[in-house]
Amino acid sequence: MLAQELKKGREIIGMDIIMPEEIEDAVEKQLFYSQEQLEKLSLMLPRELALEMVARYCYENSVVILCGPPVQQTLKNIYMLDPDVFSPSNSWWEKESFTKEFIGWGWYAVWKKGIPKSKGRSWHSAVKLLRCSQKPLSATQMAWMEFVYQKVKGESLFQESFRTSSLEDDGDRICFDNNNGIEFFSTSDNKLPIVAAQEIDLFKQQEEEK
């Protein structure tokens, strides 16, 4: 059972939030959240009034809130949860260093659309467009978020291709695509936009600072 605050978050934010128990069901119990983790996740959520603000913000800005895995997951770990969600052409990255990057547990507010005006800019110029609390997503983070959203909602979270913060061993930028399952490719150009996420407890910190 989810803690009371998690249930309240579901009631207020509705379909814009994916809960830990939904993730457990989606991966067929290959991952479990401990009771201690669930309690800590509930404490990370803002108070009810702030939750209402978050819900409105999510609706107006195409943001979804979802939970990271209960234990750190690399890209390879996520792939093994259900290879069918990934493109069959992904074998090229198996020995690349970026596959060792991981995503940890906690709440993430994820922007579904690219950061405005980030397309066509250099990486460093595009990152400067992010708000102070936003961070560009790594390949592993994008894989987890797209994977979870597809498994729970039955549809794609990201509707276009994006650059990630990850780099291929030769220095090229790793990019995400979802036309034929979750797929990654590398490029040296700046044609694609970037997408960002924010740790949800930062919403709470911002509310407490007011």
Image (cartoon, rainbow, N blue to C red):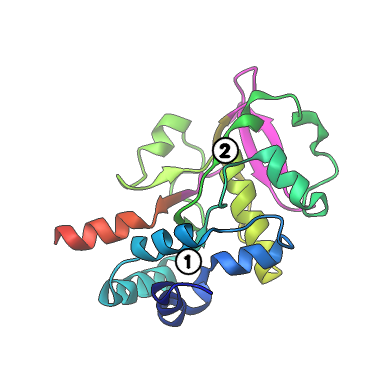
Q: Which mark lies nearer to you, 1 or 2?
A: 2
Disc 1 residue type (three-letter)? Ser
Left or right side of 9 for 95 = right
Magenta span: chief secondary structure: loop
Task: Tell me, for residue 102, which label it has, or none.
Answer: 2
- What secondary structure is marked by label 2? strand
The single residue placed furthest to the bottom in the displayed view is 11
Left or right side of 159 for 16 = left
Of residues 67 and 32, which is closer to you in this image? Answer: 32
Q: Residues within 10 Å of mark 2 (few under 14, many from 20)?
A: some
Whole-percent x, y for residue 197 in the image: 45, 51
Q: Which residues are magenta?
A: 167-196
Of residues 207 and 35, which is closer to you in this image? Answer: 35
Whole-percent x, y for residue 186 in the image: 67, 31
Which residue corresponds to mark 1? 62
Of residues 176 and 188, which is closer to you in this image? Answer: 176
Dots 1 and 2: beta carbons under 8 Å? no
Left or right side of 209 for 102 = right
**Gap between marks 1 and 2 measured at Cα:** 25 Å
The single residue placed furthest to the left in the displayed view is 210
Residue 32 figure quarter: bottom right
Whole-percent x, y for residue 44 in the image: 35, 60
Q: Is residue 156 visible?
A: no
Whole-percent x, y for residue 19 in the image: 54, 68
Q: Residue at x 55, y 64 (%)?
A: 20
Q: Residue at x 36, y 45 (%)?
A: 130
Quadrant where the C terminus sits is bottom left
